[in-house]
Structure formats: structure tokens, C-alpha cells
Image (cartoon, coloured by chain):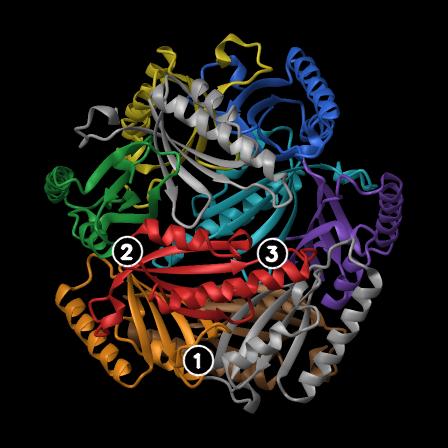
Chain colours: A red, B orange, C green, E yellow, F blue, G cyan, H purple, I brown
Amino acid sequence: MLSMVEMNVRIPMDFNKDEAARLKAREKDRFQELRRAGKWRHIWRVVGHYANVSIFDVESNAELHDILTSLPLYPFMEMKVTPLCRHPSSTHDDER
Amino acid sequence: MLSMVEMNVRIPMDFNKDEAARLKAREKDRFQELRRAGKWRHIWRVVGHYANVSIFDVESNAELHDILTSLPLYPFMEMKVTPLCRHPSSTHDDER
Amino acid sequence: MLSMVEMNVRIPMDFNKDEAARLKAREKDRFQELRRAGKWRHIWRVVGHYANVSIFDVESNAELHDILTSLPLYPFMEMKVTPLCRHPSSTHDDER
Amino acid sequence: MLSMVEMNVRIPMDFNKDEAARLKAREKDRFQELRRAGKWRHIWRVVGHYANVSIFDVESNAELHDILTSLPLYPFMEMKVTPLCRHPSSTHDDER
Amino acid sequence: MLSMVEMNVRIPMDFNKDEAARLKAREKDRFQELRRAGKWRHIWRVVGHYANVSIFDVESNAELHDILTSLPLYPFMEMKVTPLCRHPSSTHDDER
Amino acid sequence: MLSMVEMNVRIPMDFNKDEAARLKAREKDRFQELRRAGKWRHIWRVVGHYANVSIFDVESNAELHDILTSLPLYPFMEMKVTPLCRHPSSTHDDER
Amino acid sequence: MLSMVEMNVRIPMDFNKDEAARLKAREKDRFQELRRAGKWRHIWRVVGHYANVSIFDVESNAELHDILTSLPLYPFMEMKVTPLCRHPSSTHDDER
Amino acid sequence: MLSMVEMNVRIPMDFNKDEAARLKAREKDRFQELRRAGKWRHIWRVVGHYANVSIFDVESNAELHDILTSLPLYPFMEMKVTPLCRHPSSTHDDER
Amino acid sequence: MLSMVEMNVRIPMDFNKDEAARLKAREKDRFQELRRAGKWRHIWRVVGHYANVSIFDVESNAELHDILTSLPLYPFMEMKVTPLCRHPSSTHDDER
Amino acid sequence: MLSMVEMNVRIPMDFNKDEAARLKAREKDRFQELRRAGKWRHIWRVVGHYANVSIFDVESNAELHDILTSLPLYPFMEMKVTPLCRHPSSTHDDER
């Protein structure tokens, strides 16, 4: 079951640089993990912003909530969640 | 080069049903054509709306403009275009 | 899996009264059907508006889309869909 | 008499963690109390957010105001109150 | 129990003038009736607009909904309902 | 001459509690004074918010500005001023 | 007593041209009349729009409402009213 | 050449009071200077706000920019600039 | 003196096609004329929309208003005007 | 390939003045560099704001993202990116 999630990251200027670097590294690891598990299907950068557009493939809203709120950078993110489903014209298996 | 396009379709209630059906059929054909050409990379339905989220892969802004404005349902669409690029965490070839 | 759907109904003033009455009767029947099936879990009227707040319990986004877009009054509705999940404080079985 | 209340919680990053934990525990206790008293009829988590959608059943606006403004986390909440009433299609006793 | 209701009236230019006059007369009668019954406590005109700010005193949300949706000009009104309660500084009996 | 003023109070969390209490007490005194003088005609609490809806009866815009900007809590208030006048259906002397 | 009024005029494309010309001529006459009476103190065109920014000098909100709602083009206008008063730095007699 | 500028002043609560007083005095002097030079044609206070509506008469956009950005309180101001021109109904010489 | 003008064109679907074509041809001629006169300095299409971003170089706001409101497609355009001036980093003669 | 980028700069009042001056000098150098390379085609100041409207000419969205996010003042900028393309009426070579 697919959802689009738009994430905007805002780390305060006076936030500790090392801690920020650690969080970003953990965020990247977590992303790779969810990628391999087939949960985080797509990610793109939004031009000119520290933001991304992502497509998630999960079993339920509850699973999506758990994934999003446990992201290392979650406390710095503003999120917009849009539920998606297969488009009648779609022919790709992974756009279910 | 990738762009997200969010399309909202609003066909007036008193619009001729046959003409609407013809336009929708042509829209679907055009979608398949652009799909095969690798231009219209993804399409998803937005739950509860006659709307879609799409990912286009084109050579330039000009090509994207030509594709969008020549869609059969274009006169009934409201569009939002968001330029995207590869996310540093991405490992998929097709998220360039 | 739960979702909140806020529905605003706008039937044009010059729309045929009999047809409107027929659609409303069919909408009510469809609501009862979905109620009995456990899909349309709650419905409330918004004070002062021809609008409702509803809670749906479905298997997937796709099922929700099918239910919403096949409502008899759908062409007259503006919808806002908010994905929900169980609240950690919840103790009711049906707030899963 | 029913009202929907949408609550958004924003605890500043530099707020004392222990104090936050204490407030959350008290919030949960207060929720259970109001739940048992039949005042806080429903609560759901909004996917991807530290926010909830709740349904309250109170005697009057004044009672609702007292309940909301005395919540332990109230100083950190942004609230939207929507007055509701029974929907003509409703058949549930508790959707009065 | 008090609520503020802001009403904006928009009668289409091509709406039958006689019918509009009849509806306005009935609206005025209904207002006087609700005034005498103590339900429609206050009404003021918003400067420069065909709009009013009103204060209603009702038993419940349901009663308010019935009053508002049965106003003769209701189909032409856009409404905003704000639940109110007694202010701690208030000393007037009728601001309960 | 009547105006509606909607006031939203936001006192920063780290503001001195004693000073806040003093300001609130002075605000209440000032309210009573203006009430007795017939300037602050009505005040209601907005449910769920530290906010009020008020009706002022003043000689001119200048008098209203002086009253509002000299309120003890003014530096913490966000205000929206809406000029009102007598509604043609009104029969109350004090809704002039 | 001064107020700023921003007026946006939207005459539908299919509105009778002669009637529109008659209304505009009457609007201009009415403007001159109010100008001479010292009520309509200033008027400026907003660049690129069929809109104006005006300053009115009236005795009360009620007088302003009567003036605005009796303008010949009023049914085609969208209005925004902002109450003004003398600025402490002002030295002009007519900015009272 | 005329422009309307709406200025909103927000001085942080913890800003040094003496420095604020100095800046306000300099702002007033600068205003008088621009007034005498015929550049700052009008200024009015917005009721209930630390804000003004002003009319400037300058040779060019560049001159307006230089005037606005060199105001002593500029760092605390939020500005909205609206280009104006003579209204066809205007008969005042200074509304060019 | 430079201004940015963003123009959105909306020609109703049932507008006469021949008349629309005539207006578009005249719009193009007028554009070329203003281009040659150095008034309409730049024009770009906004991707996915029947809209443009333009840069005008005029003597005054009044001249800009006359140019914009006499465009053949003006009655179908929604406009946003932003006054510009030379950027301190600019080295191009034509960005004055 | 052209894009309009609107940049709003907000440097906090308590930010180190020397560091700010250094960043602005580096921003200016970077601008000149990109100007000479033909990437930053136009820049204009927005009247009354610490903001600019710019036109970029790049090979791809990715190049634009790299340019924007590596600007020395980027951490203080709010950006809006609008993809552009050649307008059918354009005759300038550099409006491709």
C-alpha cells in the first residue's frame, strides 16, 4: 500500500554540528535498511530545498506511522502524508 | 531529469459524456506512449480524488511543457510542477 | 486500518430536485450497506454545514479510494482524507 | 453533545526531558479518567504527526473549554474545535 | 450555551428578484421569532459587506444546526461557527 | 459605534510567572473599568483557546486604537478588528 | 474618522455593455458627489488591476456602510475595510 | 509616482528599551524629513496594530527601495508594497 | 524602471474559438511592438501553465498600468505586479 | 534551460556582524563567478525587501540544486523555484 510523504528538514543553526552529522548518518543507514526491506520505495530531492519527496510501500497506516516517527531526523521534520493507490492507466507492477 | 507533476482533473458536470469518454481514452493512449518512451516514469492515483501524482523524466523544462500542455485532458487540469533531482541517499539508477 | 474523511457536499442550485433526492436516497442506502459491513465506522454532521466527518475502516488505500469514488454523491463532494492509526493511550478495540 | 478536537503537540526541543515525561504521564492519566467518565469518546493518532483527532461528548461548550484548557499538555497544544451533531443517516446510539 | 456564527450572503445576480425579496422577508420573520425565543441573542452588520456577526444561545450543537440550516436564506449563506463560553472577567448574566 | 475585536493572547513559556499574574490582574481591572464606562460591551471566551471575542462601543477609530493599545496584555496579543454597524433586522437599542 | 477601503471590481464578461457603461457613469458621479462632501478623501488605481485604494472620512461605521453599499458598482465589488486613525508622527490636518 | 506601503513593526520583547527609543526617535525624524521633501505623502495608523499605511511619491522604484531600506526601524518591519497610479475619477493634483 | 509581472491567462472553454484566435494574434503583435520599444524586456513561459513571467521597463507606474490594461487578452488575465530595482551585485546595464 | 528563483534572505538580528559581512562578500563573489559562466543570467532586487528575483540557465535540475544549495547565504534563504521555458512570442536568443 503506497503513500507519498513530503519531508522538510529544518535543523536549527545553533544545533551541535557533530550531533547533526551523527543523526544524518543514522538517517542514511535507516533509509538503506528500509530501502532493502522494500518499504521506502522511492526518494527524490526537491530542487533548492533540504526536502524530499518519498514513496512508501507499507502494510498499514500504523506501520507508516511507526516508520516515520522513528526516523533519526524526525524531530526536525515537517511532514505531509498523501495516501496513494494504483492508477487505472498504470502497467507497472510496483505501482500497486 | 526528473519532475513531479500533481494533476487535478475537473470536468464540468454538463460537459458532453461521449466527448469526455473520447478524451479519456486518448489521454490513456498518450500516457502509454509516453510511458513506453520512458518519459512518464510513474503515476499514482490520489485517494479520494480525480487526481494523480506523476514523475516525469525529460531532457529539459521545454520538453516537459510540451508534453503537459498537449495532454488531451490538459484543458481540464490544474497542475503543480516540482523540479526534482537525485537524492544523496538514493541507490536506484532510475532516480537520477 | 482507519482514515478520517471530511466530506463537503455542494449540489448546484439549478440541479434537478428529483434527481438530487434519488441520489441522496441511494447515498443513504450505500452508507447503511458500508456501515453494516463495518467499513464506514462513524459519521457526524458538521454544525451549520452540509458536510460530515467520517471514520472509515478499510484494508488498504485502494479499498478506501474505491469506496469514496463510488458514492452516489461523489461528483458533488469535496474530500479531505487524513490517515489515522491507533493512539498509544487508546483502550478501545475499534480504534485500532 | 459532540465536538471534534484536533490537537497538535509541539514541545520545544530544549524543554526538560523529565518534565516532559511527567506531563505526558499525567496527560495519559487524565485521558483515561475522561475516557472512563465518557467525556473523551474517541482518540486517534494522525499518521506522521505528534497530533490526534478526538471526539468529545460534553454537556456544554463551557465544559469542553474547561476540559481542554486543563489538560497537562495544553500549553504545548494548538487546537481546532469543530462542533458536531448527529448525522441523519446515523444509527449508532453514541453518535448523538 | 453560546456560539458566534458569521454569515455571508451571496445571492446570484440572475436570481429572481421577487423570490429573493420573499426569502429576505421570511428570513427577517424567522429572525424575529428566534429573537423573541431568546435563541438569536445578537446580530450586527459587517461594514461594507452583505454579512453579519451573530451570537446564538442554544441548548446544544444539534439545536444550533437545526436553526441555521432551516434559515430561509441558508442555501445562499457561507457560515463560520465558533463555540464560545463565559469569559472569566464577564459580569453580565447573559454572557454565560 | 461598534467594532468586533478578536484577541489572541500568547505569553511566552519562559515569561516571568509573577509578572504575568500582575499583568492579568491589571488587564481584568482595566476590563471592568471599560465595562462600567460602557466601552467594552461584550466579551466571550473562544472554546479551547486563550482568546476572546469582544464588542466595543466607542466614539471613533482613534478611541478604539487608544483603548486596545493601552491594554496591559496588548504586547502579547494578536488582534483582528472588524467594524460593525446596526443590522436592519435588529430591534435592540444597544446594537446600534 | 478615517478608513481605508480596497475595492476590486469584477463585471462578468457577458454583462450588458450599455448597462455597465451606465453604472460606471453613475459611479463616477457618485464619487464626485462624495468627494465634494469631503467623505471620499482619496482614491488611487492599483497598477494592473481594475481596483482602487480609497480613504474615507466619515462620522461612523454606519455612515461608511451606507456609502459603500449604495455605490452603483457595489454588486460587482469585493471590499476590504481597514479602520485607520491619526499616526503619532502625522502633521497634516487631514490625516486625523 | 505613487506607491502604497503597508508597514508592520515587530520589536522583540527582549530588545533593549533605550535602543528601541533611540530608533523610534530617529524614525520620526527621518519621517519628518521625507515628509518635508514631499516623498512620504501620507501616513495613517492601523487601528489596534503597531502598523501603518503610507503613500510614497518617488521618482522610481529604486528611490523607493533606498528610502524604505534605510529607515531606522527597517530591520523590524515587514513590508507590503503596492504600486499605484492616478484613478480616472481623481481630480486632486496630488493623486497623480 | 523595472517591474516583474506574472500573467495567468484563463479563457473560458465556451469562448468563441475564432475570437480567441484573433485576440491571441493581436496580443502577439502588441507584444512585438512593446518589445521593439524596449518596454517589454523579457518574457518566459511558466512550465505546465498558460502563464508567463515578464519584465517591463517603463517610465512610471502609470505607464505600466496603461500597457497592462490595454493588452488584448487583459480581460482574461490575472496579474501580479512586483516592483523591482537594480541589485547591488548586478553588472548588466539593462538590469537598472 | 531556464528557471526563476525567488530568494528571501533572513539573517537573525543576533548573528555575528563580521561573519555576516564575510558571507555576503563570498555570496557576491560566487554570484560574479556564476554570472561569468552564464549560469546566473539575471538578478533583480525586490523593492522594500532583502530579496531577489533571479533567472538561472543550467543544464539540469541537478545542476540548479547544486548551485543553489552551495550559495554562501543559502542557510539564511527561503527559496521558490519556478521552471520556465521559451515563450512562443519570444524573439530573444537568450530566452530559450
Q: Which residue is mark 1?
A: B96
The residue shown at (55%, 54%) is A76
Q: What separation in Å lies between label 3 and label 2 (alpha carbons)?
A: 58 Å
Task: Name the chain letter of the residue that bears numbered label 2.
Answer: A
| Position in image of residue A20 (x %, y %) | 62, 60
Disc 2 or disc 1, which is closer to the eye? 2
| Position in image of residue I69 (x %, y %) | 52, 66
Is G48 or I94 nearer to us in this picture?
I94
| Callout 3 secondary element | strand
Task: Name the chain letter of the residue that bears numbered label 1.
Answer: B
Q: Which mark is residue G45?
A: 3
- Residue H11 appears in which quarter of the rendering? top right
- Check the image and report above or below for F70 versus A9: above
| Position in image of residue B73 (x %, y %) | 27, 71
The residue shown at (53%, 39%) is G68
The residue shown at (44%, 80%) is B96
Q: Which mark is residue A59?
A: 2
Residue furthest to the top: E93
Locate residue G6 relative to residue G37 in the image: left or right: left
